[in-house]
Amino acid sequence: MKRIGVFTSGGDAPGMNACIRAVVRGAVYHGIEVYGIRRGYSGMIAGDVYKMESHSVSNIVQRGGTILKSARSKDFMTPEGRKKAYDNLVELGIEGLVAIGGNGTFTGAMIFGNEYGIPTVGAPGTIDNDLYGTDYTIGFDTAVNTALDAIDRIRDTASSHDRIFFIEVMGRDSGYIAVQSGIAGGAELVMVPEVLTPISEVVETLKQGWSRSKSSSIIIVAEGDEEGSAQEVADKIKTQVDENADIRVTTLGHTQRGGPPSAYDRILASRLGLGALEGLIGGQKNVMAGIINNDLVYTPFEDTIRLPKPINEDLLRMVKILSV
Ligand code: F6P
């Protein structure tokens, strides 16, 4: 393999730049030309690519976002879009790809690989940590710490005013950020998409807290929870608790997607970027590089997409025990 492309796609995640850096520097080290593809599959279709050198990735290891930019391409979901992308890659002489992203990114890569045979190796970059085949995804640790910083601040004001706060964290289909930030932030309850927490249980938790003289409470709601958004959960609760209960809602939103990556994410991203590149050079295709029990492993895209990554229900149980 003489020339490869690298791109980021889907929702950005802190650490993607460290991952791009590892791919580019690794390619330079191995004597392989590397092209950066801007805006993921959109740039592949538009031919928006540029040759990257070692200095192209200087001074980015500490930066959030992605210097290659990111997008969710609708055109790549069509056979015509993928044909255009393939023609562009052939014209540029790109023989393999490193894809940094999440579920949608790898679904696209798998379909593309099956249609045109271009080998792709993925590096898991998403704050959601919802990919089978790796213990942690790039950006998750930073997002948890960003959420935690906000929870700590909210706890101060919640306590001063004797308030109940419902804090919504990201995770469309996944409660990982909610569980980890909830444990670390000392939440009373964590609501996640994977396990239903009925409104009656939330009400019960609050009432029990009051009976033990708790004057403020923090409830973390993952974005994708079945009972609805944090605002919807709060609205349902209002009618069922003491009418004097002082309730507030905070949605942390995209603050969790930005900011400098944590040391953990920089190291993880560096390992996964180099792992993806060296896998590609070594003949791997249509797989995602991951770290499981501190070992580098490759998992077929099909499995990372199809197989669920279950939440550890013991952790949810622990939240309840530790908030008595
Ligand atoms: O997949 C990462 C994620 O941040 C999800 O947690 C969230 O639901 C989604 O992306 C938000 O996407 P967008 O940035 O397109 O609004």
Image: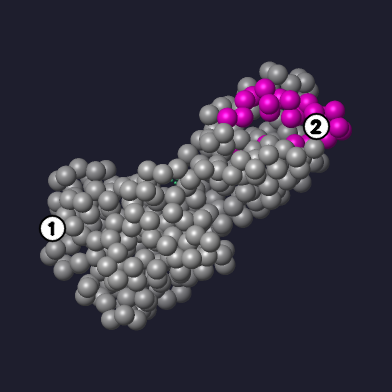
Q: Which mark is residue 87?
A: 1
Residue 5 in view (yes/no): no
Give the residue at the far right of this rendering: 213
The tag on residue 33 is: none
Q: Above or below — where is 62 with respect to 176?
A: below
Q: Nearer the viewer, residue 59 or 120?
A: 120
Q: Position of residue 77 (x, y in %)?
A: 24, 43
Residue to which mark 2 is pinned: 209
Whether label 2 touches label 1, CB < 8 Å = no
Count the marks. 2
| Residue kind at label 1, given as amino acid type | Asp
Vertical placement of residue 28 versus 301, above or below: below
The residue lying at 16 percent from left, 67 percent from top is: 92
Vertical position of residue 55 compared to residue 312: above or below: below
> Which segment is the magenta one?
196-221
Find residue 30 and report its horizontal and vertical position in percent. 31, 80
How far apart are the alpha carbons under marks 2 and 1? 63 Å
